[in-house]
């Protein structure tokens, strides 16, 4: 009996991309929950005020906020200077009208999604936008942080934070934009998870598992 | 300490210069204090507390005391624009005359519409004379916003019918320093709230000189007098923050020094006015306190002779010393996250949830269609 492989296996996501993806997912989950809590503290007061509920939740928000800030910066770096150009290759699709048409048609159940890199043009554009949203939510978060912790890092950022506060028209504006942007992430996550599952089923390849294992499978064409 | 020594010498030189000038009415501060029943001990305590408030070391209290005595050498012109006079009231309406209001009386006040005896043509002449005689030397304090729409026609002052815009531009030209007293003069205040039909603006937006902004509706008498004292003492502006407010007064958020801050960190919140939490003095964040977004010294300096301030009285801060507060801090009894967005009467969270729901419906429709869609050919 002659068993020959029917599919090829390609490594599409490097370990760094996978680790940062899941760290970012964890950060976003914790930040959205703690963020909504800080905006409207819904737990009742504890028995004793030795339990600093608001402080603990703010602490978690800050820790994961710094994690998200660091990941956002590293991902920007990796995108431009990472060894594999599988992400950068998508530029070619973004600047091609026929790629866009092909992409949108494939999402409406018409034809294949052929792409140069690992992302389709709409997917790539969405990721670019969400990366810049992450940058803005991190910056507004750091401005708010500098107002709570005046020493050390908060102190170092104080002048820059003051300048940004003035440009945005006051700390209330910084805070409310930080809040609005949270919703961008909530809605993004829903669409993102659906599209990951759907495109795996529709286009018959490894999709959700790729960001865990790193591999995608393609049928061998004889 | 070297910088302090240099600052001290600068203050001394400034006061020596002031001493050469003529006093306004010849009556010394000491005799005025005696008339009002204020003792020398009160004066020493006041000098020390103003020194501490300005974040200067204690030896500067002698300079503060001298500056107070020489206040009658510094010409002050106080203009009223579109306003309610609440800022002047904050300063002069005290239950007993204290040093803050007395200094305001002692300073060489050349023109102040609420306090002057003159009226009509005589008042106008006083203003013109003061601006001419003390050109380049007078301190200009402005209360109220400047309407700029229709070339400033929404505000005319005095018998000659000059617009506020004309008056402020003319007065600013000859001023040694300009202080915007209160949120209206500093940032436009309530008059500048959306849709702002009169085009009301803060003073710094219509003159091209540095303006010290004393936000607050009203600012406390301490912040007004402290700024006056700083100018009299040093002849220059104090260190200013991002919105040109003196750092010694507006350097920290209301939230940072709030007496209820411990309640906030512990998660003890007033849920509605009059509940048990309110009686216990819990944090007012959930009933709309804007202390976390507001820079001012209200929790430490308070109002009306250090008696009380809004949060102590049981209502949250409404952020009155911040730019655009009437729009940005609304609703005053809800936290920012529950702010109703203008035009759609819904909160950001409602809008977000609706979009999220619409997205979920769209995804569901897409998923269902996918079941019936023609499978992809190999």
Image (cartoon, coloured by chain):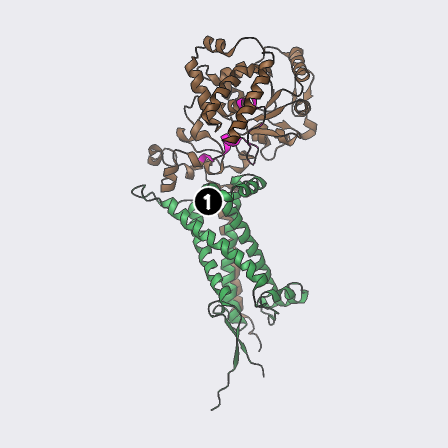
Chain colours: A green, B brown
Point out the stretch of residues depicted in magenta. B228-254
Q: Is residue B263 visible?
A: yes
Residue A7 at what x, y percent from top left? 52, 79
B247 drawn magenta: yes
Residue at the image position 51 percent from the left and 83 percent from the top: A5
Residue at the image position 45 percent from the left and 56 percent from the top: A27
Residue B28 at what x, y percent from top left? 52, 10
User: Quarter of the image containing the C terminus of chain B?
Assistant: bottom right
Q: Nearer the viewer, residue B279 or A111?
A: B279
Q: Is residue A42 visible?
A: no
Locate residue B238: give its quadrant: top right
Instruction: Report the residue marked by disc 1.
Output: A152
Q: Nearer the viewer, residue B251 or B266?
A: B251
Locate residue B143: give its quadrant: top right
Q: Residues within 10 Å of mark 1 (few under 14, many from 20)?
A: few
Residue at the image position 67 percent from the left and 19 percent from the top: B135
Q: Nearer the viewer, residue B157 or A50?
A: A50
Q: Is residue B43 above or below residue A74?
A: above
Question: Secondary structure under badge 1?
Answer: helix
Residue B88 at what x, y percent from top left? 53, 20
Q: Is residue B139 above or below residue A174?
A: above
B332 drawn magenta: no
Residue B255 at what x, y percent from top left? 44, 36
Q: Which chain is mark 1 on? A: A
């Amino acid at each position: 009996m002659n068993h020959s492989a029917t599919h090829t296996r390609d490594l599409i996501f490097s370990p760094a991309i996978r680790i940062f993806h899941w760290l970012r997912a964890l950060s976003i989950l914790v930040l959205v929950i703690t963020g909504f809590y800080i905006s409207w503290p819904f737990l009742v007061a504890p028995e004793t005020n030795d339990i600093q509920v608001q402080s603990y939740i703010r602490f978690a928000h800050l820790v994961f906020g710094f994690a998200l800030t660091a990941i956002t910066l590293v991902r920007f770096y990796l995108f431009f200077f990472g060894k594999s150009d599988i992400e950068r290759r998508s530029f070619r699709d973004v600047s091609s009208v026929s790629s866009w048409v092909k992409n949108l048609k494939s999402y409406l159940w018409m034809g294949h999604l052929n792409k140069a890199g690992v992302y389709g043009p709409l997917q790539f554009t969405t990721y670019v936008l969400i990366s810049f949203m992450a940058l803005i939510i991190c910056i507004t978060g750091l401005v708010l942080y500098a107002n709570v912790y005046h020493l050390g890092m908060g102190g170092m950022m104080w002048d820059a934070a003051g300048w940004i506060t003035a440009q945005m028209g006051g700390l209330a504006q910084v805070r409310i934009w930080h809040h609005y942007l949270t919703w961008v992430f909530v809605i993004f996550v829903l669409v993102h998870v659906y599209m990951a599952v759907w495109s795996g089923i529709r286009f018959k390849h490894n999709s959700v598992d790729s960001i865990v294992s790193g591999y995608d499978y393609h049928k061998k064409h004889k | 300490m070297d910088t302090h020594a240099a600052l001290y010498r600068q203050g001394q030189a400034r006061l020596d210069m002031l001493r050469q000038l003529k006093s306004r009415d010849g009556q010394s501060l000491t005799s005025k204090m005696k008339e009002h029943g204020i003792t020398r001990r009160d004066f020493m305590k006041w000098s020390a507390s103003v020194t501490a408030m300005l974040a200067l070391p204690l030896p500067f209290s002698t300079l503060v005391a001298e500056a107070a005595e020489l206040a009658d050498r510094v010409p002050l012109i106080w203009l009223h624009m579109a306003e309610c006079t609440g800022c002047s009231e904050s300063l002069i309406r005290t239950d007993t005359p204290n040093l803050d209001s007395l200094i305001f009386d002692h300073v060489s006040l050349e023109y102040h519409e609420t306090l002057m005896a003159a009226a009509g043509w005589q008042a106008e002449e006083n203003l013109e004379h003061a601006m001419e005689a003390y050109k380049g030397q007078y301190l200009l304090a402005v209360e109220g916003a400047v309407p700029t729409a229709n070339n400033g026609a929404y505000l005319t002052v005095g018998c000659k019918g000059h617009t506020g815009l004309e008056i402020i531009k003319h007065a600013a030209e000859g001023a040694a320093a300009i202080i915007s007293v209160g949120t209206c003069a500093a940032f436009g205040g309530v008059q500048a709230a959306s849709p702002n039909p009169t085009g009301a603006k803060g003073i710094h937006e219509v003159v091209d000189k540095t303006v010290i902004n004393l936000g607050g509706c009203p600012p406390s008498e301490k912040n007004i007098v402290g700024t006056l004292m700083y100018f009299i003492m040093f002849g220059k502006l104090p260190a200013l923050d991002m919105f040109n407010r003196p750092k010694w007064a507006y350097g920290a958020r209301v939230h940072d020094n709030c007496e209820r801050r411990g309640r906030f960190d512990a998660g003890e919140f007033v849920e509605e006015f009059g509940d048990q939490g309110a009686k216990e003095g819990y944090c007012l964040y959930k009933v709309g306190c804007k202390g976390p977004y507001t820079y001012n010294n209200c929790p430490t300096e308070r109002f009306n002779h250090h008696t009380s301030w809004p949060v102590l009285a049981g209502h949250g801060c409404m952020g009155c010393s911040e730019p655009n507060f009437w729009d940005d801090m609304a609703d005053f009894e809800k936290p920012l996250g529950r702010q109703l967005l203008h035009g759609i009467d819904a909160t950001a969270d409602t809008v977000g949830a609706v979009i999220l729901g619409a997205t979920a419906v769209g995804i569901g429709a897409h998923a269902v269609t996918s079941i019936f869609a023609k499978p992809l050919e190999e």
